[in-house]
Image: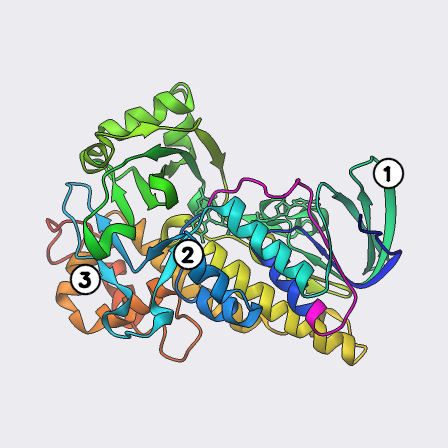
Amino acid sequence: MLEIQDSYDCVVMGGGPAGSTTAALVAESGASTLLVEREAMPRFHVGESLMPETYWVFERLGVLDKMKQSNFVKKVSVQFVGHQGKESQPFYFDQHDPRECSSTWQVERAEFDHMLFENAREKGADCVDATRVHDVIMDGACVTGVRLQEASGMVRDIAARVVVDATGQHALLANRFGIKVDNPELKKAAIWGYYKNARRDEGKNGGATVILQTNMKKSWFWFIPLQDGITSVGVVGDNEYLLKGRGSPEEIFHQELSICPAMLGRLEKSQLVSEFRITKEFSYATTKHAGDGWVLTGDAWGFIDPIYSSGVFFALRSGELAADAIVEGLQNNDTSGEQLGKWVTDFVFGTQWIRKLVDAYYTEEFSFGRFLKNHPQYVENLTDLLIGRIFYPGAGDIFKDMEPALARDRSGKSADSSSLKV
Ligand SMILES: Cc1cc2nc3c(=O)[nH]c(=O)nc-3n(C[C@H](O)[C@H](O)[C@H](O)COP(=O)(O)OP(=O)(O)OC[C@H]3O[C@@H](n4cnc5c(N)ncnc54)[C@H](O)[C@@H]3O)c2cc1C
């Protein structure tokens, strides 16, 4: 049984992908590190579809071989189905870049998150689960430790030179400091369940994430093939539209299914093997990302929208970047907010491209199919964004033409408004 020390160089709150990444890399540098997870591991989590750019973080964490040897379904493409059932060509990630890093996996999160949690332990972090951080300890404006409640019920104060908030949507620090801002444009809700024997495409596209619009474009479904013949199927729509006065989650889910024939077809011979789960209002940002003795990572930093499956990649990458800033800060005895958050400006710059793609998807009049027909030169750029290649100069070139097209469509001046939105 692990004996938690009274003091650490770094305490990480939350044992999801962001927290486990930061804890592993900080511990690997030799700094004493505590990773605290509230739930007993392994624990359930939504969000199974990865972006290929997670590859580099897996490599850095030393878990690439474990991923390759796992039973996780290989994902080499994504596909979109429009509101009239028209299917886009699959976006094959290796189309322009055949390297191994252009493919990824659909992961069962309990297993995947547990693997990362254990990896942090292997790298030298003290890892505890079933232990909740109640609050942070402050000295003026500086965070100097955490107050936690162990599984036994005992409450303890632990001192830390750096505290990382990786508590996901709980966003412990952002809530405490009042720096969390919900995105009024994306007040969404999701209802999802798990099906056995749903129909997948034959061959290479069989592991694809498929995003399907319902017939009035008021909601969309995800279809994420997992191991053992299980498929994660969820519907996302405006909170008001999806949840207000429409019955139980199961009833709403089936009402939405009935207006998405392409999804109905895929589920024809399947069996539901779970309850339906529900979550809402999950898109938000934070107005400050680090301060003296603290830094935010992953969903605790902010969350955009699940449509492009970017959440876990952002968690892993921000976890990695925060770890580098923490290790440097600990070595130079500089745990100021400036040091701990030095990576954030570039991170926000890169992630804006996904934010803009989300905006485009939710612009009713806009059609990706039409846009790409008129601007075929951007297929490669768009595929790169779907892969998660967002942190290089030119990553956002597509928006030079997409933004004016969006503005025209929003003002109703589209040249061809009859085209399908795919
Ligand atoms: C409907 C929906 C669908 C999604 N689909 C996808 C997808 O297909 N692909 C994708 O990449 N992303 C998806 N996401 C997003 C993805 O799930 C998250 O971005 C990702 O889990 C973030 O990782 P994290 O480590 O920041 O947070 P989490 O994975 O949420 O981990 C945070 C951890 O902190 C723990 N914790 C919370 N409070 C405390 C506390 N006080 N003390 C100790 N521990 C605490 C929690 O128990 C949790 O284990 C989806 C999100 C939603 C809402």
Q: Which quadrant of the view contains residue 103?
A: bottom left
The reply to whether the residue tagged 2 has its Cβ within 8 angstroms of ligand 1 is: yes
Left or right: 80, with 40 as reference point: left
Left or right: 280, with 389 as reference point: right
**In the image, residue 147 lies at what x, y percent?**
83, 47
Amino acid residing under circle 3:
Phe
Residue occupied by mark 2: 50
**Residue at screen point 20% across, 51% down:** 422
User: Dot 2 lies on which element?
Assistant: loop
Give 4 or 326, whichever is nearer the viewer. 4
Is there a contact, CB below 8 Å, between mark 2 and mark 1? no
Closer to the chain start, of discs 2 and 3, is 2
User: Dot 1 lies on which element?
Assistant: loop
Q: Which residues are magenta?
A: 27-47
From mark 1 to mark 3, how far is it between C-alphas?
59 Å
**Residue at screen point 29% across, 66% down:** 93
